[in-house]
Amino acid sequence: MIIGILKESGTENRVAMLPLEIAVLKKLGVEVLVEHKAGEKAFILDKDYVTCGSSVAERKDVISKSEMLLSVNPPVTNEPGDFREGQVLCCVLNPLENREWIEKCRQQGLTILALDIVPRTTRAQAMDILSSMATVSGYKAVLDAASMLPRFFPMFMSAAGTIKPSKVLILGAGVAGLQALAIARKLGASVEVFDVRSAVKEEVKSLGGKFIEVEGAREDAAAGGYAVEQTEEFKKKQQELIQQRAKASDVVIATAQIPGKKAPLLILKETVHSMKPGSVVIDLAASSGGNCELTENGKTINVNGVKIVGKSDYPSDMPTDASKMFGSNIVNLLKIMINKEGKLVMNMNDDIINGTTAVHNREYVSQRIKQMLNIK
Ligand code: NAD
């Protein structure tokens, strides 16, 4: 089988796979074709890809010769018509934003492996791109906040007096929130964390954070470890408590999300107005509506001296390691799909393959995709 790696378009700096991971693929009996300059923005040159045993080619040749094409984002600059029936596209799909494109791919008989719907099971952990990218986002968000803040993060005892540690408030203790907690603690800040899932309380404590609880959160075991929408009464109580804690904080890192829904609104306009000038809010939920009422996706705004950063694409700002993790997750997925002869086998009885396949043989496959796109 030949696997092609496409160059990303627009502002994306990542590439779907780095040379070291390609070397692992080659051991599985696969040939790899890389689009000219695909790794350039992640600081990987064409010659590095050639050294690991892959070939570099122009985009049209990569597309025409490969059975499977890997990319970070859907190759939407290409019409599905540029691909051929039976070809497999493997990328982060963002189904709600790419509904029409997915439908065109289905009609044309393409297969789409959607890396953002890999089931979140223990067996699939090594393939979980969302976790890898959330790790990068949590890390980078804290570093960004620390560099924007007009204060130190750690406590300092110097001849010029004692400087108190900064206070960081984290909303949402998923993968990004826990990573942000760990990094903020390493930098010496004092950290408080909110979440609606009580299961994360111990993890927060073990990383040195203080867990802030609001009584009466709705939890649903059937949501597979994810948060669910809260009652109006709970939301009001939570917004009030967040306002109280945000007033006392120097930094707020907002990461709260509900899969397939708009992000919960946790920081109201009034809360921002009550915060100290110089404070920083980093809203990682910006692309799904934001946790802060004033967030503008892709922008940093200043409201009475409070900086609000609406940013959901931190992984693209750290393209080398983000691409390394991305490619490594793909290799782990492909290991269960490539047989001893180096051929692709789509075993739809495998829960990971079934759960990750958006469309195949002109049908929608994954239950999650069907739910998200409301397909009967
Ligand atoms: P996410 O990005 O969907 O959400 C981030 C966090 O926001 C979650 O912790 C969520 O509970 C929280 N949140 C949602 N609404 C909130 C509200 N109103 N107030 C405060 N917090 C709110 O989460 P994620 O990082 O993708 O992970 C969620 C969970 O998925 C994990 O904790 C874990 O249980 C599961 N998971 C499993 C695997 C695996 O087994 N392969 C991998 C990663 C995550």
Image (cartoon, rainbow, N blue to C red):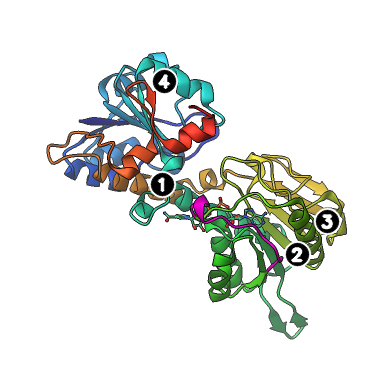
Q: Is residue 191 above or below residue 310?
A: below
- Residue beneath disc 1: 119
Q: Is residue 303 left or right of residue 148?
A: right
Q: CA distance from mark 2 to mark 1?
A: 36 Å
**Ligand 1 closer than 8 Å to label 1 CB:** yes
Whether pointer 4 and pointer 3 mark residues with C-beta atoms closer than 8 Å, the reply is no
Which is more N-terminal, label 1 or label 3? 1
Three-letter code for the amino acid on which mark 1 is drawn:
Pro
Which is more N-terminal, label 3 or label 2? 2
Where is residue 154 drawn, in percent x and y? 66, 74
Of residue 199 and residue 317, the one placed in the foreground of this image is: 199
**Image region (quadrant) for ligand 1:** bottom right
Quadrant (top left/top right/bottom left/bottom right) for the N terminus: top left
- Residue beneath disc 2: 250
Identify the residue at the far bottom of this view. Answer: 159
- Residue beneath disc 3: 271
Q: CA distance from mark 3 to mark 1?
A: 36 Å
Examine the residues drawn in magenta and state their main secondary structure.
loop
Which is more N-terminal, label 1 or label 4? 4
- Residue beneath disc 4: 105
